[in-house]
Amino acid sequence: MKNDNAMMTKAEKTKQYIIERTAPIFNRKGFAGTSMNDIIEATGLTKGSIYGNFDSKDDVALAAFDYNFGAVSSMIRIRMAAKPHSVDKLKVYLTVFSDFVNLPLMHGGCPVLNTAIESDDTHGQLRAKAVGAIENWYKNIEDVIKHGVDMGQIKQGTNAKDFAGAFIALIEGGMMLAKVTGKMHGLKAAVKQGEKMIGDITA
Protein backbone atom coordinates (compact mmCIF):
# COMPACT_ATOMS: atom_id res chain seq x y z
CA MET A 1 0.00 0.00 0.00
CA LYS A 2 2.86 2.35 0.83
CA ASN A 3 4.41 1.67 -2.55
CA ASP A 4 1.12 2.48 -4.28
CA ASN A 5 0.91 5.75 -2.37
CA ALA A 6 4.48 6.64 -3.28
CA MET A 7 3.68 6.25 -6.98
CA MET A 8 0.60 8.50 -6.82
CA THR A 9 0.71 12.10 -7.97
CA LYS A 10 -0.18 14.89 -5.55
CA ALA A 11 -3.58 15.26 -7.23
CA GLU A 12 -4.23 11.52 -6.98
CA LYS A 13 -3.27 11.54 -3.29
CA THR A 14 -5.64 14.44 -2.63
CA LYS A 15 -8.44 12.66 -4.44
CA GLN A 16 -7.83 9.45 -2.48
CA TYR A 17 -7.72 11.44 0.76
CA ILE A 18 -11.13 12.97 0.02
CA ILE A 19 -12.59 9.55 -0.75
CA GLU A 20 -11.20 7.94 2.41
CA ARG A 21 -12.37 10.78 4.65
CA THR A 22 -15.87 11.01 3.19
CA ALA A 23 -16.65 7.32 2.57
CA PRO A 24 -17.75 6.64 6.19
CA ILE A 25 -19.96 9.75 6.15
CA PHE A 26 -21.76 8.77 2.94
CA ASN A 27 -22.27 5.26 4.32
CA ARG A 28 -23.70 6.59 7.58
CA LYS A 29 -25.72 9.59 6.36
CA GLY A 30 -26.46 8.63 2.75
CA PHE A 31 -26.17 10.77 -0.37
CA ALA A 32 -29.03 13.15 0.46
CA GLY A 33 -27.96 13.49 4.10
CA THR A 34 -24.33 14.29 3.32
CA SER A 35 -23.82 17.99 2.68
CA MET A 36 -20.91 19.80 1.12
CA ASN A 37 -20.19 21.20 4.59
CA ASP A 38 -19.86 17.62 5.87
CA ILE A 39 -17.29 16.94 3.15
CA ILE A 40 -15.40 20.17 3.90
CA GLU A 41 -15.39 19.43 7.63
CA ALA A 42 -14.23 15.83 7.16
CA THR A 43 -11.41 16.73 4.80
CA GLY A 44 -10.36 20.14 6.09
CA LEU A 45 -10.24 21.26 2.45
CA THR A 46 -11.95 24.16 0.77
CA LYS A 47 -14.95 23.78 -1.48
CA GLY A 48 -12.77 24.87 -4.40
CA SER A 49 -10.20 22.18 -3.64
CA ILE A 50 -12.87 19.49 -3.51
CA TYR A 51 -14.40 20.63 -6.80
CA GLY A 52 -10.91 20.79 -8.24
CA ASN A 53 -10.76 17.01 -7.80
CA PHE A 54 -14.40 16.04 -8.35
CA ASP A 55 -16.98 17.53 -10.69
CA SER A 56 -19.82 17.25 -8.17
CA LYS A 57 -21.01 15.74 -4.91
CA ASP A 58 -22.39 12.90 -7.05
CA ASP A 59 -18.88 12.01 -8.18
CA VAL A 60 -17.60 11.99 -4.59
CA ALA A 61 -20.52 9.75 -3.56
CA LEU A 62 -19.89 7.28 -6.40
CA ALA A 63 -16.19 7.07 -5.52
CA ALA A 64 -17.07 6.68 -1.83
CA PHE A 65 -19.37 3.77 -2.62
CA ASP A 66 -16.64 2.04 -4.62
CA TYR A 67 -14.28 2.54 -1.69
CA ASN A 68 -16.75 1.22 0.91
CA PHE A 69 -17.83 -1.77 -1.15
CA GLY A 70 -14.26 -2.54 -2.14
CA ALA A 71 -13.14 -2.53 1.49
CA VAL A 72 -15.90 -4.91 2.62
CA SER A 73 -15.41 -7.20 -0.38
CA SER A 74 -11.65 -7.28 0.16
CA MET A 75 -12.12 -8.28 3.80
CA ILE A 76 -14.51 -11.07 2.79
CA ARG A 77 -12.17 -12.25 0.03
CA ILE A 78 -9.14 -12.37 2.37
CA ARG A 79 -11.05 -14.31 5.02
CA MET A 80 -12.41 -16.72 2.41
CA ALA A 81 -8.93 -17.36 1.03
CA ALA A 82 -7.92 -18.60 4.47
CA LYS A 83 -10.71 -21.22 4.45
CA PRO A 84 -9.96 -24.32 2.34
CA HIS A 85 -13.48 -25.80 2.65
CA SER A 86 -16.31 -24.31 0.58
CA VAL A 87 -18.76 -24.51 3.48
CA ASP A 88 -16.42 -22.45 5.66
CA LYS A 89 -16.04 -19.92 2.86
CA LEU A 90 -19.81 -19.38 2.83
CA LYS A 91 -19.81 -18.96 6.60
CA VAL A 92 -17.42 -16.01 6.22
CA TYR A 93 -20.36 -13.88 5.03
CA LEU A 94 -22.27 -14.68 8.20
CA THR A 95 -19.25 -13.97 10.41
CA VAL A 96 -18.49 -10.62 8.80
CA PHE A 97 -22.02 -9.26 8.75
CA SER A 98 -22.98 -10.55 12.22
CA ASP A 99 -19.97 -8.67 13.63
CA PHE A 100 -20.61 -5.41 11.78
CA VAL A 101 -20.87 -3.35 14.99
CA ASN A 102 -17.21 -4.17 15.73
CA LEU A 103 -15.96 -3.51 12.20
CA PRO A 104 -14.98 0.12 11.53
CA LEU A 105 -15.71 -0.40 7.83
CA MET A 106 -19.37 -1.07 8.59
CA HIS A 107 -20.20 1.25 11.47
CA GLY A 108 -22.83 2.85 9.26
CA GLY A 109 -24.18 -0.52 8.16
CA CYS A 110 -23.78 -2.43 4.90
CA PRO A 111 -22.87 0.02 2.10
CA VAL A 112 -24.77 -2.04 -0.47
CA LEU A 113 -27.97 -2.13 1.58
CA ASN A 114 -27.74 1.55 2.52
CA THR A 115 -27.18 2.63 -1.06
CA ALA A 116 -29.83 0.31 -2.50
CA ILE A 117 -32.51 1.61 -0.15
CA GLU A 118 -31.71 5.28 -0.57
CA SER A 119 -31.04 5.34 -4.30
CA ASP A 120 -33.79 2.98 -5.48
CA ASP A 121 -35.88 5.71 -7.10
CA THR A 122 -33.73 8.78 -6.56
CA HIS A 123 -30.21 8.30 -7.93
CA GLY A 124 -29.75 6.13 -11.00
CA GLN A 125 -25.95 6.02 -10.88
CA LEU A 126 -25.78 4.97 -7.25
CA ARG A 127 -28.53 2.42 -7.85
CA ALA A 128 -26.48 0.96 -10.70
CA LYS A 129 -23.48 0.70 -8.35
CA ALA A 130 -25.60 -1.19 -5.81
CA VAL A 131 -26.93 -3.53 -8.49
CA GLY A 132 -23.40 -4.25 -9.67
CA ALA A 133 -22.30 -4.98 -6.11
CA ILE A 134 -25.16 -7.42 -5.56
CA GLU A 135 -24.40 -9.16 -8.86
CA ASN A 136 -20.79 -9.45 -7.75
CA TRP A 137 -21.85 -11.13 -4.51
CA TYR A 138 -24.18 -13.45 -6.44
CA LYS A 139 -21.28 -14.55 -8.62
CA ASN A 140 -18.88 -15.06 -5.72
CA ILE A 141 -21.36 -17.22 -3.80
CA GLU A 142 -22.32 -19.19 -6.90
CA ASP A 143 -18.65 -19.82 -7.68
CA VAL A 144 -18.02 -21.10 -4.15
CA ILE A 145 -21.00 -23.45 -4.37
CA LYS A 146 -20.07 -24.79 -7.81
CA HIS A 147 -16.51 -25.41 -6.66
CA GLY A 148 -17.84 -27.09 -3.52
CA VAL A 149 -20.02 -29.40 -5.60
CA ASP A 150 -17.01 -30.32 -7.78
CA MET A 151 -14.96 -31.05 -4.65
CA GLY A 152 -17.69 -33.16 -3.05
CA GLN A 153 -18.11 -30.66 -0.22
CA ILE A 154 -21.54 -29.43 -1.26
CA LYS A 155 -24.46 -31.60 -2.35
CA GLN A 156 -24.94 -32.39 -6.01
CA GLY A 157 -28.00 -30.66 -7.46
CA THR A 158 -27.66 -27.55 -5.25
CA ASN A 159 -29.09 -24.58 -7.15
CA ALA A 160 -26.29 -22.05 -6.71
CA LYS A 161 -28.26 -19.06 -8.00
CA ASP A 162 -31.29 -19.71 -5.80
CA PHE A 163 -29.08 -20.24 -2.77
CA ALA A 164 -27.14 -17.04 -3.43
CA GLY A 165 -30.30 -14.96 -3.79
CA ALA A 166 -31.89 -16.28 -0.59
CA PHE A 167 -28.59 -16.04 1.30
CA ILE A 168 -27.98 -12.42 0.33
CA ALA A 169 -31.59 -11.46 1.07
CA LEU A 170 -31.38 -13.12 4.48
CA ILE A 171 -28.16 -11.36 5.46
CA GLU A 172 -29.21 -7.94 4.18
CA GLY A 173 -32.64 -8.32 5.79
CA GLY A 174 -30.98 -9.09 9.10
CA MET A 175 -28.71 -6.07 8.70
CA MET A 176 -31.72 -3.87 7.99
CA LEU A 177 -33.49 -5.05 11.15
CA ALA A 178 -30.40 -4.41 13.26
CA LYS A 179 -29.86 -0.94 11.84
CA VAL A 180 -33.49 0.19 12.07
CA THR A 181 -34.27 -1.23 15.51
CA GLY A 182 -30.84 -0.89 17.06
CA LYS A 183 -31.25 -4.44 18.35
CA MET A 184 -29.34 -7.53 17.29
CA HIS A 185 -31.85 -10.36 17.73
CA GLY A 186 -33.23 -10.04 14.18
CA LEU A 187 -29.74 -10.26 12.71
CA LYS A 188 -28.84 -13.13 15.02
CA ALA A 189 -31.94 -15.01 13.85
CA ALA A 190 -30.98 -14.37 10.22
CA VAL A 191 -27.45 -15.66 10.85
CA LYS A 192 -28.87 -18.78 12.53
CA GLN A 193 -31.09 -19.39 9.50
CA GLY A 194 -28.11 -18.80 7.22
CA GLU A 195 -26.17 -21.45 9.11
CA LYS A 196 -29.09 -23.85 8.59
CA MET A 197 -29.13 -23.08 4.85
CA ILE A 198 -25.43 -23.91 4.66
CA GLY A 199 -25.95 -27.08 6.68
CA ASP A 200 -28.71 -28.19 4.32
CA ILE A 201 -26.42 -28.11 1.29
CA THR A 202 -23.35 -29.56 2.97
CA ALA A 203 -22.41 -32.94 1.50
Image (cartoon, rainbow, N blue to C red):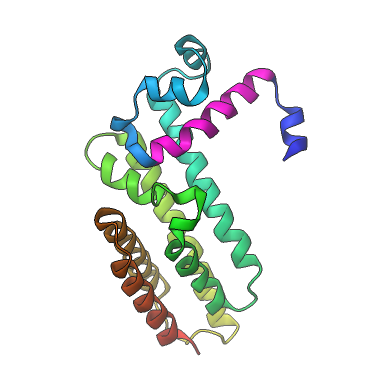
Question: Taking 70 as reference, is 60 left or right?
Answer: left
- Give me the residue at 70% from left, 21% from top: 9
Q: Position of residue 149 (x, y in %)?
A: 53, 82
> Against 66, is 97 above or below?
below
Q: Quadrant of the N terminus?
A: top right
Q: Position of residue 45 (x, y in %)?
A: 52, 16
> Against 183, is 30 above or below?
above
Whether residue 19 appears in magenta in the rendering, the answer is: yes
> Against 82, is 35 above or below?
above
Q: Which of 88 and 38 is in front in this view?
A: 38
- Give me the residue at 37% from left, 78% from top: 192
Question: Taking 196 as reference, is 96 left or right?
Answer: right
Q: Which residue reaches farthest bottom?
A: 203
Question: Taking 74 as reference, is 171 left or right?
Answer: left
- Give me the residue at 49% from left, 40% from top: 66
State the image quarter where residue 60 is shown: top left
The magenta-colored residue range is 10-27
- Give me the residue at 59% from left, 29% from top: 16
Whether residue 79 appears in magenta in the rendering, the answer is: no
Q: Position of residue 188 (x, y in %)?
A: 35, 71
Q: Position of residue 79 (x, y in %)?
A: 60, 64
From the image, give the main secondary structure of the stretch colored magenta: helix
Q: Which residue reaches farthest top?
A: 48
State the image quarter where residue 128 is shown: top left
